[in-house]
Amino acid sequence: MFMGHRRVSAPHRSSLGYRRVRARRIVPAPRDWQQYEGAPKLLGFLGIKAGMTHCAYIEDRPRSHLANREVTTAVTCIETPPIVIFSLRGYKKTAYGLQIAADLMASETKEELKRKIKLPKNYDFKKSKKKFDDNLEAIVELRAVVHTQPYLTGIGMKTPQIAEIKIGCNSIKEGYEYGLSLLGKELLIRDVFKAGEFVDAMGVTKGKGFQGPVKRHGVKILQHKSKGTKRGVGSIGPWTPARTMWTIPRYGQMGFHMRTDYNKRIMQIGSDGAQIVPKGGFVKYGIVKNNYLLVKGSIPGSKKRTVMLRGPVRQVPQAIKEPQILFISTKSQQG
């Protein structure tokens, strides 16, 4: 087969496995949840990304060539103020997927929630609860509607963020009773996750605006004598068929994409931010005033951005065991 003027072969630039479109919402909305069996609990939590540091711990993977030795790793700090469960939502199964069967809102809500949504003036809690009870047999999935409390942090944000989090349970009745016990109350990160567990970190990546194919896809810059363009692909398609296929690396939106990092290990959950915050605070964030957790490695999103921590939907790589941390760096990041 002839290749025209091509003398060498070249790999396809960029990956076709990711959608490069702007995220529709800043708060992640998972499409799938962990397959969970056990006592009822929430399968996710919302936090705010603060920054990164590093820590030293004892490697506890038995098959690692560094097993039982001190190793250093980068960790991401996520501030996790208590979330408030202000509503329960039940879904029924239809031919068109899951549809809302019943809603139940707490009789008393936080005053700050009015900044985000319009609350009903005369809400009849007993009537809504009776409707929920009547539809309980048709409900196949329970979710808690929660909101964050960013005003407890130092980022200057007053409007809470709202998200739905599935309630994991053995039966809908057990999950419903668990949700009723938490309705209108605050929930801490320790009530959902513990150190050593694995979570999926979901967030919206840093936005980089409208970019060309060189930065967006890693296309090679052509020689200076090239005709037409240098920072682009040599050909965007053949004469026949006379159209540009979607597989061609082109310019467009870069960043601000919804992304998920699977199986991120929780290294530590704490309540005193002074133990892990660098001197002078995290750059572009400040100090951590609430509960926090350290996640091994990096997670998508910029600082001050809301992150969804979800129970793992894939098989975890090792047994759940709290890591033995020896040192956490608090060296100033401001030089």
Image (cartoon, rainbow, N blue to C red):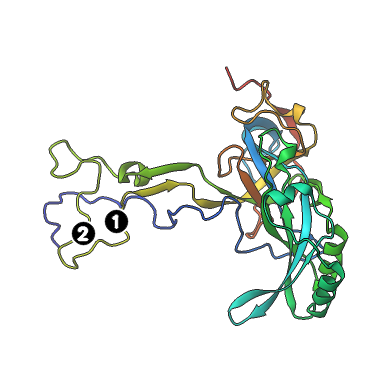
Is there CB contact under 8 Å for labels 1 and 2? yes
Residue 128 position by quadrant? bottom right
| Mark carried by residue 102 | none
**Residue nearest the viewer, comparing 122 with 270:** 122
Q: Amino acid at mark 1?
A: Ile
Looking at the rendered image, the quarter that the C terminus falls into is top right
Which quarter of the figure has residue 43?
Answer: bottom right
Task: Give the numbered dot on residue 248.
Answer: 1
- Label located before the other in sequence (1 or 2): 2
Evaluate whether residue 61 shows in this view. no
Give neighbour class at mark 2: few <14, some 14-19, many 20+ (Cα, 10 Å). few
Which residue is tagged 2?
237
How crowded pointer 1 is (Cα within 10 Å; few <14, some 14-19, many 20+) is rated as some
Q: Position of residue 49 (x, y in %)?
A: 63, 40
Q: Residue furthest top?
A: 335
| Residue 333 coordinates in the image, percent (x, y) | 60, 22
Task: Say which quadrant the N terminus sits in.
Answer: bottom left
Q: CA distance from mark 1 to mark 2?
A: 8 Å
Residue in the foreground of this view, choosing between 324 and 85: 85
